[in-house]
Image (spheres, helix red, strand yellow):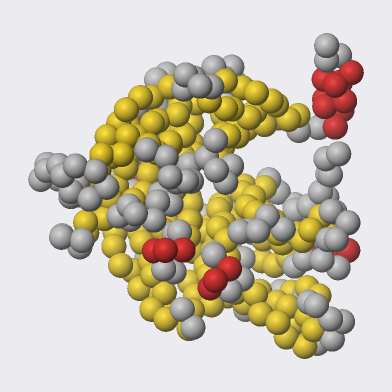
Amino acid sequence: MPQILQSSHKDYIHDIAFDHYGRRIATASGDRTVKIWDLDENGEWTSSSEGGATEWKAHLGAVTSLSWGHPEFGQLLATSGSDGFAAIWEERAEGGSGIMGSSGSTEQSPGVSGATSTRWTERARLTDARKSLSCVKFAPRHLRLQLATVSADGMVRIYEAVDVMNLDQWLLKNSIKVEADSSTDLGVTCLDWCSGRFEPPTLVVGDSLGSVKVYRYSDVSRNWGLYLTLQSHTSPRRGVLDVAWAPDVGRSYHLISSCGRDELLLVHRLKKNTSSQDGNTNSASKTEGGLELDTCQQLDNSVDTWRVAWNVTGTVLASSGDSGVVKLWKSDFRGNWKCVSDIHGSLRDQASSMKFAP
């Protein structure tokens, strides 16, 4: 049975993310706070009021996005905010209780014993953006400790920790100028990393003009360049709301999902091409792990879609929107995507649908 979490947030929740093992949840809210939930031995999600998580003020404005780092680097959380900066948070074990965090709030979470507690400490602030940040994402583990941010100023910025043992120092490695409509205060709206271990560092980016673009890093030029332009979200309303790159589990193709203000939910299929290709002068090198746009399928979705996400094998796509329903999509043997299940946001709606189901 589903469990309703009483979040105690005083504003809308803008983002929610599971950690690497799926046993912790982080929520980001417009009330400027971040909250952590833990899964106990009974399968229940517990909050700080019940002794299982922490909550703290993370930004001066709304927290727009968050991302968990790989546990190989410790318990790390990156957050972005409308105040124009990204923050790196690390959870540390410390004796005692009532520990004062760097944001000025009391942060406490029990550890493995009663004499030990943990707190989330701000290790670094990334303040290069000139406008609000829309999204932050840690890179896959094989790319070391890197993260990318997107901003309303039309820029994608890639950072890397100078020393994984000292998270106070982060280097701005590269910046990508995206042709986005920064006058709308939206600019670049979303991004996601390609998780393929045998692919060069690759990003998919969505912006307020409705463009969905793939950028790739070239070892030759030591810079990022535009690699592919996918079907856009421009009519009748333009703008991309979310993108998600399916995990690479050894398939001969990649899958990217995107949704936009045009009420379209798309799945882009990119075919892997191992042969050498010469890109144009404005593109990254295509000589290693080349990608070609194969197909783009529009899913039969009757409501606005705001967020999309893949399962760990990249075989099931989840979408959510204004209807309060999470839809699960799966491809048949012909490659056609169909809705195989839906999850209602309220217990009342779920009970109603189960009662009248044939």
Residue depicted at x 47% and y 46%: 249
Residue 196 visible in this rendered orientation of the protein: yes
329 relative position to 252: left or right: right
Q: In which quarter of the image is residue 218?
A: bottom left
Nearer the observer, 212 or 187: 212
Number of on-image labels: 0
Q: Where is residue 271 in the image (x, y as percent from the top left)?
A: 32, 34
Residue 120 vs 137, above or below: the answer is below
Q: Where is residue 351 in the image (x, y as percent from the top left)?
A: 87, 25
Residue depicted at x 87% and y 82%: 114
Nearer the observer, 339 or 160: 339
Residue 226 vs 44, above or below: the answer is above
Residue furthest toward the top?
A: 358
Q: Quadrant of residue 207?
A: top left
Nearer the observer, 177 or 1: 1
Residue 321 visible in this rendered orientation of the protein: no
Residue depicted at x 75% and y 67%: 54
Residue depicted at x 61% and y 59%: 20
Q: Quadrant of the N terminus?
A: top right
Q: Quadrant of the C terminus?
A: top right
Q: Where is residue 91 in the image (x, y as percent from the top left)?
A: 65, 75
Q: Where is residue 316 in the image (x, y as percent from the top left)?
A: 58, 34
Nearer the observer, 230 or 338: 338
257 relative position to 89: left or right: left
